[in-house]
Image: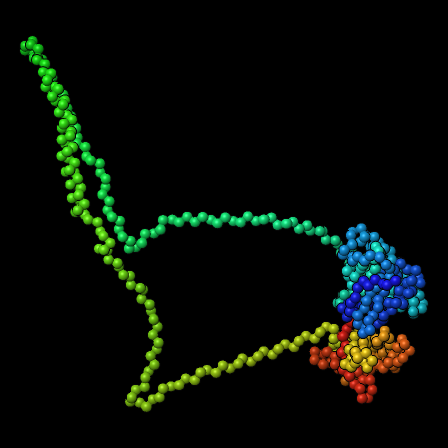
Amino acid sequence: MAKILLRSGFLDDFQSVGENGQAVFDSALQIRETLRLRKQPLEACLAIPQLNDDGDRVDWYSPVTGDVVSWAAADDDARRRARRLLESAVGSARALSQRCLQSEKTAQQLFGALLAKTAQFPAANHVYLVGGKPVITFWGFVNLNQSVREEVLDCLAQEEREPEIVMLPPEPEEEPQPERLVLSEPDAPLLAPAPAPVAPQIAPPVAPVEPVAAPPVAEPALATPEVAAAPAPGRKRRSLWMLPVAAAVALAFGAPAAWKMLHTDAAVKPAVSVADIKAVEIAPAPVKTVDAPVEPQPTAALPLAEAQIAAPVDTPAPEAAAAPAAAPKTLMVMDAGQVKAGSTRFLNGAWRVTVDVNDPVTGKPPALRYELKDNKGLVRISRSGGVVCRAELYAGLHQSGTLMIKSRGNARCSDGSRYPVPEVACKAGDQDVAQCTGRYDEKTVLPLTFKKVSA
């Protein structure tokens, strides 16, 4: 049955963990087989690694079958069940590791030390649920520039499921109504024609009505007892009939006189016409001008020549010295203080060595992996066809400051063959970055580059 591929990645993207220069990943297959023979449940939780031909990329396959769900996509119940299984498996493996560390055999102690760091993995996104069971990929690795976790499952506890956010359709926005512009009365132009005079409409004058005199009352005579004679009725009627006639006459003669007086006043004060208004010219404000300085002309009396002024020559400013680029953190740096003291602590760790030569069979440069601690270690060479070669190394510093890394012989390969191991010599270059060369024989010297993989 075909295995299920869970994840792939480059080894340089992570930092391997191990003990005494021995990485967990280098013994991954042996660790899984030992756990299977010891019937440890952790063996079913560890994915099966498989390196490519170049030895720089690894594929992780599931040891069980079933539907694959990433840790982030699993529901809360599935996460809780998987976490309980992992806690039980890690606890059982930790107990086995303690028993192996207390053994008197060196191989058992090494296995116990490696098993204590086997369950380390970079983050929660490297855990998958296959058929509901947890499977860990990139076990034996942590993220770059990070140390191992005391509790390997802490990253799973911190990974909380984010609440689902329901996106509601946006409400249609009401288009704002354009404001109505109310134009005020425009200002009258400065030279607008004057409006024509309008004669006021005056109501025709009404002649005052003369009061009607009351008929005189004759006082009784005191001397004689005779009674005064009453006015005749015909005279009284004549005076009442004259009132409307007098009003009509006054109106007829008074109206023309009043109209004439009004027209006479209007003629005295005639209206001003547009033609009589003269436009007043407003002179612009005087502008102060700066007169160009008058060049003195040479006089005829003196033999003077016009001066010629040469254009100034722009002197380029000296460019600031560019700051030297910082050396990448992954390159080997031979600390000057350590080199002076004769220490090689900067060499401790796992290194990927690139050789500037191609393999005659594959046409690609061989993949070398150096693991050193306290001037001792191993070299691992990956060749085509999955062939892996190994050899022991030892290192030291000369009084001249040259670092030497040598092997005790050719590397032994898994197919029974031997492979030459170069004699490495390194000196501190710019910014103390190691400049290394590898000598295969007296005539073959090739440049090497050391890049740190893990501490």
- Please identify the quarter of the rendering in which residue 135 is found: bottom right
Q: Residue 331 location, x and y as percent?
A: 74, 75
Rendered residue at 80%/50% (across/down): 77
Q: Residue 55 location, x and y as percent?
A: 81, 73
In this rendering, would 332 be left or right of 386?
left
- Quarter of the image with the C terminus is bottom right
Q: Determine the residue located farthest toward the top in the rendered image.
A: 225
- Please identify the quarter of the rendering in which residue 317 is found: bottom right
User: In the displayed structure, would residue 258 be above or below residue 438?
Assistant: above
- Quarter of the image with the N terminus is bottom right
Rendered residue at 75%/67% (across/down): 145
* Nearest to the observer: residue 74 or residue 121: 74
Q: Residue 436 location, x and y as percent?
A: 76, 81
User: In the displayed structure, would residue 97 be above or below residue 201?
Assistant: below
Q: Taking the image as drawn, is residue 404 in sight?
A: no
Q: Taking the image as drawn, is residue 248 in sight?
A: yes
* Nearest to the observer: residue 140 or residue 110: 140
Q: Residue 47 location, x and y as percent?
A: 84, 63
- Please identify the quarter of the rendering in which residue 49 is found: bottom right
Numbered-mark total: 0
Rendered residue at 82%/65% (across/down): 60
Colour mapping used in the image: rainbow
Q: Determine the residue located farthest toward the left in the rendered image.
A: 223
Q: Determine the residue located farthest toward the bottom in the rendered image.
A: 303
Rendered residue at 85%/55% (across/down): 85
